Amino acid sequence: MSSRVIVALIGLAQGPLLHSWAVAAGRDEQFSLGLACPIGIGHQRWGTRCSCGRLRWREAATAFGLGLVYWLMAGALEGNLVLAAHLAMVSLTAMLIITDADHFRIPNRLLYPGGAFCIAFLVAAALIEDQSSSLLTAALGAVIYSGLLLLVFLVAKGEGFGFGDVKLAVLLGFFIGFQSLSALAYALFITSLMGGGPAILLLLAGRSRRTAIPYGPPLILGTWATIIWASSLLA
């Protein structure tokens, strides 16, 4: 069995648990190592939804999505530890996609410890695997990307575009910048295609949050896509 398949299976296996943690974080509930229903255990399950409201189809979608992204990342990155750091970032941001889609929230209880761990992991991995030259552009990427989104936040005056997205951009910018600073432009372009750009324009046009979309998912998906296809985009 190839290493890429093993990596994909790891992503597939952890999908339901990460979905459960994302639901708990979005509702400010305690994390559990089990796949209990969000409001308790022992409820009758039927079809694709538990009687308490647990979306089993979304757990499956999270698992298959993680498996696919893990597989693609494994084919795009060099270095086992650098790859592992990127996979940790994917797992964290996959949970943030769910919380933002459900509640328009990037919970600090996920972003702060998880983001710090992912960045520290990538720094250590780069030093060990002789990719330390990429750390400067990674730091600059974090500053530039978060600075751009901070400008959007200030122009929008907090109307719908939350400061959580600005904080998220520190993490995303660090990992994008690890590829190169040029990758930031591609990340912004891909993100706009996925809905971030039109949503930001709606805010700047004075539309209410109800007419917009959560911004975390397109930012995250744009980051994943840029990293996966960085070698082709920057060739």
Image (cartoon, rainbow, N blue to C red):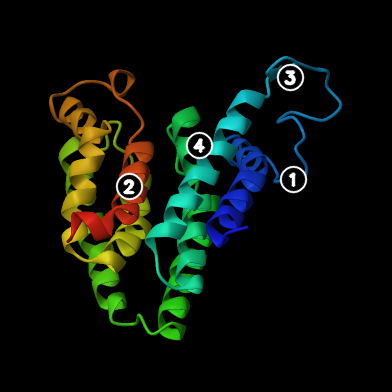
Q: Given contact means CB atoms under 8 Å apart, are the residues at marks 2 and 3 in contact?
A: no
Q: Is residue 174 above or below residue 152?
A: below
Q: Given contact means CB atoms under 8 Å apart, are the residues at marks 1 and 2 in contact?
A: no
Crowd around label 1: few <14 · some 14–19 · many ≥20 (10 Å): few
Residue identifier under label 1: 32
Q: Secondary structure at mark 2?
A: helix
Residue identifier under label 4: 99
Mark 1 is on which residue type? Ser
Cα–Cα gap, marks 2 and 3: 35 Å
Residue 34 rendering spot, x and y as whole percentages: 78, 42
Cα–Cα gap, marks 1 and 4: 16 Å
Q: Residue at x 62, y 32 (%)?
A: 59
First in residue order: circle 1 vs circle 4: 1
Residue identifier under label 3: 52
Q: Quadrant of the N terminus?
A: bottom right
Mark 4 is on which residue type? Thr
Residues 172 and 16: in front is 16
Q: Residue at x 66, y 46 (%)?
A: 13
Residue 55 rendering spot, x and y as whole percentages: 64, 24
Cα–Cα gap, marks 1 and 2: 30 Å
Q: Which mark is residue 225?
A: 2
